[in-house]
Every structure is written in C-alpha cells, then in structure tokens.
Image: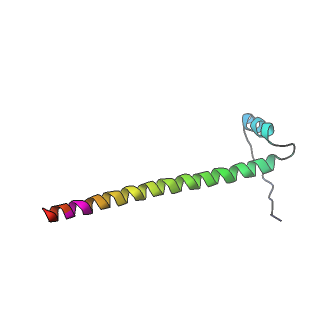
C-alpha cells in the first residue's frame, strides 16, 4: 500500500467548487493527486518536445554548415 501524508493546504473557493463538481463524494484527495500527476507528466512532455525541437534546430544548422563546406570544396 502507498503511504499517504495529510497536508493542510489553502485553495481558492472557485477551485474547491471545481473539485467538488467533478470529484465523487469524499474523493477530493484522489482527484487532486491525479491532477498533479497529469500536470507533471504534461510538463515533462512539453520539456521533451522543446528539447527535441532545439536539438533538431542545432542538427539542421550543423548539417547546413557541413553542406556549405562541401559545396565550397566542389566549386
């Protein structure tokens, strides 16, 4: 079984209303836990996409420089 820790947190009334609208009775903790996990996963995916995009740009710049060197040699 997973360990649980009780936290004392404050949330805006509007957020609590949203939680209560979608959480089954007595399941606020599970909803918040699931939401935090999904949020962190999405942050990880966004960071990965950003890093892949940056890597692709760096490789494209490098490949262009290599191609330009070759074209210069051939001329």
Specify whether residue 66 is in view: yes
Q: Which residue is drawn at 87% across and 45% down?
A: 26
Please, which residue is most extreme toward the front here? Answer: 74
In the image, is 11 to the left or to the right of 39? Answer: right
Which residue does the image show at 80% across and 49% down from the upper left?
A: 29
Q: Nearer the viewer, residue 74 or 43?
A: 74
| Predominant secondary structure, magenta span | helix
Using the image, determine if residue 69 lies above or below residue 40.
below
Q: Which colour scheme is used?
A: rainbow
What residue is rendered at 74% in x and 52% in y?
33
Q: In this view, does 3 lie above or below 9?
A: below
Instruction: Tell me which corner region of the image, top left, top right, bottom left or bottom right, holds residue 13.
Output: top right
Q: Nearer the viewer, residue 3 or 40?
A: 40
Q: In this view, does 75 lie to the left or right of 69?
A: left
Q: Inspect this view and state whether residue 8 appears.
A: no
**Quarter residue 23 falls in:** top right
The residue stretch that appears in magenta: 66-70
Q: Which of 65 and 23 is in front in this view?
A: 65
Q: Is residue 67 one of those drawn in magenta? A: yes
Residue 16 image offset from top left, x and y in percent: 77, 38
The quarter of the picture where the N terminus appears is bottom right
Q: In this view, does 35 lie to the left or right of 59?
A: right
Q: Is residue 50 left or right of residue 43?
A: left
Q: Position of residue 44 (x, y in %)?
A: 58, 56
| Residue closest to the far left | 75
Q: Which residue lies furthest to the right in this view?
A: 25
User: Considering the image in quadrants, where does the C terminus appear?
Assistant: bottom left
Residue 3: say if magenta: no
* Image x and y of residue 61, in percent: 31, 57
The image quarter in which residue 45 lies: bottom right
């Amino acid at each position: 079984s997973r360990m649980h820790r009780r936290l004392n947190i404050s949330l805006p009334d509007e957020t609590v209303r949203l939680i209560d609208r979608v959480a089954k009775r007595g399941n606020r903790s599970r909803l918040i836990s699931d939401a935090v996990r999904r949020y962190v996963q999405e942050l990880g995916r966004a960071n990965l996409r950003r890093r892949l995009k940056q890597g692709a740009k760096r490789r494209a710049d490098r490949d262009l420089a290599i191609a330009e060197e070759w074209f210069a040699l051939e001329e």
